[in-house]
Amino acid sequence: MKLWNRLGASLAIIALAAVAFGQTTTTPPATCAAPATGLTALNFERVIPLADILYTLTPNAPASLLAALAGGALEIHEILIYNPQLGTVTSTLFAVAAGSPLPTPNFNFTTGVIQVSTVKVSQILFGCSPVPSMLIVGTGSTTSGVFGAYTNVPAAISIGYTTDSPPKINNVAEVAAGVAVAWSATASGTLTVPAAPTVPPPPGTGPTIIVTYSNGSVTTPAMPNTTIQAGSSPFLLNASSSTGNGALTFAWSSSANSPVAFVATSTPGQILVQFPGPGDYTINLTVKDSTGASSTFSVTLEFLGRPQ
C-alpha cells in the first residue's frame, strides 16, 4: 500500500532500536478494562517517515518525486478512512512539503494523489494488553499508483490508541502482503469504538459496610457479628459512611423472634432502633449499590434498660 525506499529497512531497524533502548518508562501506560467490541469510526491522517517505508520492488513514481522525498523536500502523508456501511478502509497516499501540518490544509486531492488503495475488511480484532489496540484484516486492491495495480492482496492495518477521550492514535503499521510495509509513531484524527459494557462486579466485591454507634458522647465502630450493649432506647446505628459503586440503598431488619421498631432519620444509612423491652436483639443490614452488588452486616444489641 505504500513504500518504495530500498534503504528503509536498515534505517528503520536502527531507528526502532534507538527508541527501544534509549527510552525509560517509569509509569505503565493506561489500558482498557476489556477489549472493544467494534469499530464505529476511523478517519485519520499520518506522516510516514521515509525510513519506515519498507519495499523491495521498483516504485512506479517519477524520478523527481523520489529525489524530493529522498532529499527531504517532500514527505509522505496518508489518510485512512473506515466506511462501516461498505466494510472498507480507503488509503489515500500523497506527498506534501516537509513539515506540513496535520491534517493537511487545502490539499488538491484531484492532482496531488500518488496512490489510492482499498482494503475490504474481513475481520477487526481488539486487544487491551499491554495497551488498547486493534488489527484490521482484509484484502487490498488498487488500480494504479507507486506500487502498480494489485487485487485481493492480503492486507492488515495495526493501530494502537490511548484511553484518553477522545483517544490518541499511535503505532500505526500497514501491510500489503508481498508489496509493502509502512509504520508511523502517531496519527491525527478520529477513532471511535463502542463504550465498554458495564460488567457487574464479581462476588465478594459488594459495598463496604461501616457501622458506628454512640453510647453517650463516644462514637464507636461496630464490629460485625458481635454483641453491643445499648444504653438507651431508641439506639442510633449509623451506616452512612459505607462505600460502594454509585448510590447506596440500606435495608434494616431484625430477627423474627425478637422484633424491634426502626425509625428512620433524615440521613440515609442511619436508623433509630426502638426496643420493646430488655433483651438481646439481632439487627441485620443489607446494603446494595447501583450495580446491584450487595453486602450484609449483622450485630446483636443487648438492651438492659427500659424503653423510653
Image (spheres, rainbow, N blue to C red):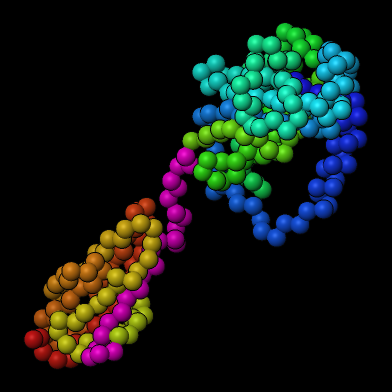
Vertical order, 216 against 266 (above or below):
below
**Which of the image's four quarters has the N terminus?**
top right
Q: Please state which of residues 134 and 288 is positioned toward the viewer in this rendering.
A: 134
Task: Where is residue 75? Give x, y as percent.
Answer: 77, 27
Q: Nearer the viewer, residue 152 or 50?
A: 50
Residue 256 shows up from this direction = no
Residue 78 showing in the rendered view: yes
Q: Is residue 18 magenta?
A: no
Residue at 78% across / 53% down in the picture?
Answer: 23
Q: For the point 17% across and 71% down, which residue is it?
A: 265
Q: Which residue: 27% across, 61% down?
A: 249
Left or right, residue 145 beside residue 269: right
x and y percent of residue 101 in the render?
66, 32
Q: How many marks?
A: 0
Which of 16/258 is in front? 16
Residue 59 image-quadrant placement: top right
Q: Where, by quadrant of the figure, is residue 275 drawn?
A: bottom left
| Residue at the extreme left of the image, as rendered | 308
Which secondary structure is most common in the magenta stretch? loop
* Residue 217 on the magenta span: yes
Magenta region: 195-218
Left or right? Give the position of 100 relative to 192: right
Of residues 190 and 124, the one nearer the viewer is: 190
Residue 49 occupies which quadrant of the picture?
Answer: top right
At 88% from the left edge and 36% from the top edge, which residue is drawn? 11
Can you give x and y, in whole percent of width and height, for residue 97 in the image? Answer: 74, 26
Quarter of the figure with the C terminus: bottom left
Q: Would you place residue 183 above or below residue 213 in this image?
A: above
Q: Position of residue 56 (x, y in %)?
A: 89, 22
Give the answer, above or below, for where 175 lies relative to 220: above
